Structures are given as C-alpha cells and as structure tokens.
Amino acid sequence: MGGADGRAAAAWNVIDSADEVIAARQHEVPLSALLPADSPRVSGVNEEHARALAQTEDALPPIVVHAPSMRVVDGMHRLRAAQLRGEHTVRVRLFHGDESAAFVLAVRANIAHGLPLSLADREAAARRIVELFPDWSNRAIAKVSGLSDKTVGNLRERSSAEDPRLNRRRGRDGRSRPVDASEARRLAGELLERDPGRSLRSVAHAVGLSPATVIDVRDKLRQGEDPAAAGRTRAVARPRPRAATSGMRTSETTRLHTLENLRRDPSLRMNDAGRDLLRWLEVHAKLPAKHETLVRSVPPHCAETLSVLARDCSAWWSRFAQQLELNRPDG
C-alpha cells in the first residue's frame, strides 16, 4: 500500500493502537537536538503547568519524538520542565510514522493524559484531521479529538461544499465509502441482477459498499423495492393460497434431501458443533409440513409469547445465513 492510502493507513493505526506504534526502547537525547511540537494546543505551552511539573520530585515519563524530524509529538510541557530544571538531556521514545500520523498521535495522546486540550484546541485539531484525512468517518475523528460525532459533522459541513473529497468517509473497518450511497447501491443492484451467483463480497468491493449493505440491496431486489433506498427492507406480507401446500411439501423434500447430504459430510458430523447444527436443522427442516397443526395447537394465552420467540429464532437464523454468505469465498 502506498501514496495517500498508505499514509492514511499508518495514521489509522494510531487510533486503536496508539502505544503500540511507538518504539518501546527509550533514548537519552540532548534537549538541543529536539524541535518544538506541531502541537494541537492553540495557545502553545502552559508555563504554569510546566513549572508544576518541574517542581515534582518524581521522574517524568519519556516524551514521544517523531524520529525522522526529531520534532516533539507528545511532551512539550515535560520538555519545558526539563529546561526549567536546568537539565541537558531528556528520555524519549521514537515514533517512525509520517508527519500526518504524528499529528494524529499528538492529538490522541493529549486527549488521553496530561493537561487537557481546550474545546478550541480539540475543534482546531478535528478540522485539521478532516483536511489531512477527508475520507475518515466522523466517528473516527471524534474518537481521536475527544469531540462528539455531531460536532465533527458540523465542522466538516462548513467545508464539504468547497472540497468534494470530504464527501467520502473511511469507516472503522478502514474502507472508504461515499456519504451518499444511493448510486453505489443502484450499481450493486445491477450487478446482482446481471450475475446472481456473484459473491456479496465481490459486489461490495466493486461498488465500494460494505457486504452488509449489499445484503440489504439484494433483499430489496427480492421484495421488489428500490435497491438505491437506504434502510431496512420492509417485510411484505403476501397471502398464500391453500393450494400452495403441495409446493411446501416439495420444498420439504428438497430440504430433507439437502440435509441428508450434509449428514454425510465428515467435516460436519465429526465435530460437536457440526452435529449440533445438523440436529437443529433436522428439527426445522420438518416443521413446514406441520405448520397448520402447530398453529392450531397453540393456546390463545401463549400466542403472543410464542410469536416473540418465533421471531427471535427467525432473526437468529437470518443473521446466521448472512454471516455464512459473507464468509463465502469470492467467486
């Protein structure tokens, strides 16, 4: 990975693994070798806080330094405290990322400890991160800058109209997606109609959507709804004529035949989880033939409770099916 994507990926690692991207080894470095931080603090070093640190008898934690430039990333107050103490060296840990990632790390570090950043500091930092990484999601930038998603969204809106790059977002999974996904959803629908056997992951990759969104597009197509419309597919109730019973029995025969084939698969029947799954499937595969009998057997006072349980079970199987589809190898 190179270019802008590589730069964004390096900075992205700072969000969830801030401590892991900094070298663990400490170095004793002359104060004269260090450059001042590209700090998220609008007003710079707080002299009162630096004096308070200088007066403490405890050893201060090592500061973090951007190795290529020797510019301080985190620890300007500790550096100033060392100067006030008359010291000539300071302990440092080195960060080897680029300057954009170093700024993200500086913001993240100053949110997590030390003298808290002011609201003005955090908003200024968020605006800069939006400019550095315009496709990062509001939630990701909010996590780094200590602001709410809504505040980051408001900051972004002030400049989105002037910069079309800001109309894409990079989510927590690292994937970049359009803010208005209607066109991508429409393209996904066309791909699914043209090639129904194509894997969901392949379609998702082709149009820049998440696999879960492609599942929603597919479900909308099956329900005859507009695939470009966001939101959950509405369940459409269609009355079934009684004559459909014979079709249901044919479907049951197919299910039982499929189940029998699965029973013979050693990768399922030779482990506990596989055997549990086969037992659950055997029960459910035979239920449709008893549908009417089971419904009539339910006492009125149990109907509501059983309907809730049935819907919960249905939702579980639906999630299970979706996960299997997502795990299917790309074709």
Image (cartoon, rainbow, N blue to C red):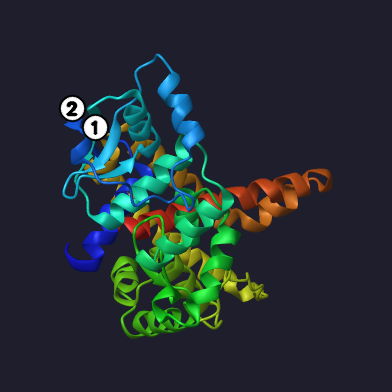
* Quarter in which the C terminus is drawn: bottom left
Dot 1 falls on a residue whose secondary structure is strand
Dot 2 falls on a residue whose secondary structure is strand
Q: Position of residue 155 (x, y in %)?
A: 54, 66
Residue type for callout 2: Glu
Q: Position of residue 123 (x, y in %)?
A: 53, 57
Foreground residue among 36 and 293 = 36
In the image, residue 85 sits, relative to residue 143, either above or below, namely: above
Residue shown at the point (28%, 42%) measured from the top left? 268
In the image, residue 288 sits, relative to residue 231, either above or below, namely: above
Foreground residue among 275 and 316 = 316
On residue 28, the disc is: 2
Mark closest to the chain's N terminus, 1 or 2: 2
Foreground residue among 249 and 213 = 213
Foreground residue among 230 and 102 = 102
Q: Position of residue 11 (x, y in %)?
A: 30, 53
**Label 1–label 2 contact, CB within 8 A:** yes
Residue 204, image quadrant: bottom left
Residue 256, image quadrant: bottom left
Q: Position of residue 14 (x, y in %)?
A: 33, 47
Residue shown at the point (32%, 30%) measured from the top left? 83
On residue 213, the disc is: none
Residue type for callout 1: Val
* Quarter in which the N terminus is drawn: bottom left
Q: Which residue ends up furthest to the top in the rendered image?
A: 57
On residue 92, the disc is: 1
Count residues near mark 2 (Cα–Cα under 10 Å), then give few for <14, some for 14-19, many for 20+.
Answer: few
